[in-house]
Image (spheres, rainbow, N blue to C red):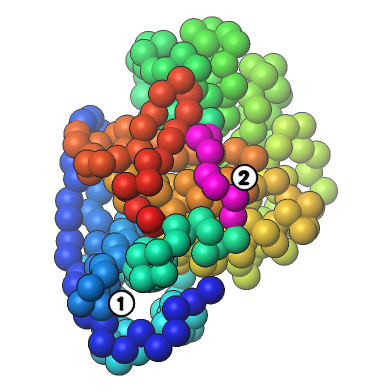
Amino acid sequence: MAAQGLRGLTLDLRVERFPYHQPFRIAGHVFTETALLVAELSDGTHAGRGEGAGVYYLGDDIDHMVAEAAAVRGAIEQGATRADLQTLLPPGGARNALDCAFWDLEAKQQGRPVWELAGLNAPQPLRSTLTLGADDPDIMAKAALAIDPEAPVKVKLTGDLGDDIARVAAIRAARPDAWIGVDANQGYDVGTLADLLPVLVEARVAQLEQPLKRGREADLDGLKRPLPFVADESALSLADTASLVGRFDVVNIKLDKCGGLTEGLAIARQAKRLGLDVMVGNMMGTSLSMAPSYLVGQLCDIVDLDGPTFLACDRDPGVVYRGGMIDCPDAVWGN
């Protein structure tokens, strides 16, 4: 529950940049670093932190996040609570950073971990995908062999049908027994999607994430789905969830999209009531981003929390990847 009467809080906002160890390519974008908004709330005795990476395809960049968070500083320092935050700010990276800082602060004030405050069971390690950025098929096949052999593999596509077919075939040949999911990042239309689907089925791909552009969801009406379709860009917040039924099979929850752990948990619970499977992902970020998402992951069928693996340097302490699993030590956040 939200803490009550948090008057006398101070809010510190800062920007931290984390370069990648190599460029990361998806459909339409190449990333070389993540710029993060870090929010820290203090009552003078306890301090809580949260981190936001924003949503690049919505213009929710670091300047936008900083401006949004700064605009509500006065309200927060005058006593606004985590519950108030849900109406003070729209979904996005700024609200994510602040919402998670509130959760962390509440845990410290009450001497109870966030998972307990959120009504969850004690968190357990989760099997998490590791993502291959789009590249030449041979390079991606080598990368698939170089990652943890026990980890599920998520493959970024670009929307170029011929190249994507070659990517999927090369990775399946390199990893014949691996769980493989692909992410189109809005790269296809209904026509090219029809050509892609048989290839994915033949390659035993487990799921297809966001095949069409956001706003073209109605194009999926009546389309036979021979493998599960995952909504990512089509599922930004709780308000989108009901509209996914019949068009998608899985909703991918990202805290930067929905604006924090509070709404992320609400989406997971609502999706399950609607008969949708639930996935948790990330918009990159450090272990400070992964920790609250790890709690959402306790409710999920599929977990994709590999953001720190792309960074030249993560936070310390950080989440641990081993044997295809992600584990989040208590010291990272929320305890």
Foreground residue among 263 and 78: 78
Measure the alpha-carbon separation of dots 1 and 2: 30 Å
Would you name the residue on which mark 1 appears? 68
233 versus 3 height, above or below = above
Main secondary-structure element of the magenta-colored stretch:
loop
181 versus 275 height, above or below = above
Q: Which residue shows up at 72% across the image and 32% down it? A: 227
Q: Which residue shows up at 46% across the image and 20% down it? A: 323
| Residue 195 drawn at (x, y percent) | 66, 29
Foreground residue among 39 and 188: 39
| Residue 221 drawn at (x, y percent) | 78, 52
Quadrant of the image containing the C terminus: bottom left
Q: Earlier in the sequence, mark 1 or mark 2?
A: 1
SS class, disc 2: loop
Q: Amino acid at mark 1?
A: Glu
SS class, disc 1: helix
Foreground residue among 309 and 237: 309
Direction front: furthest residue? 111
Would you name the residue on which mark 2 appears? 300
- Horizontal side of residue 13 vs 182, given as left or right: left
Q: Which residue shows up at 20% across the image and 77% down it? A: 44
Residue 99 showing in the rendered view: no
Specify the segment rendered in magenta: 120-126
| Residue 111 drawn at (x, y percent) | 40, 64
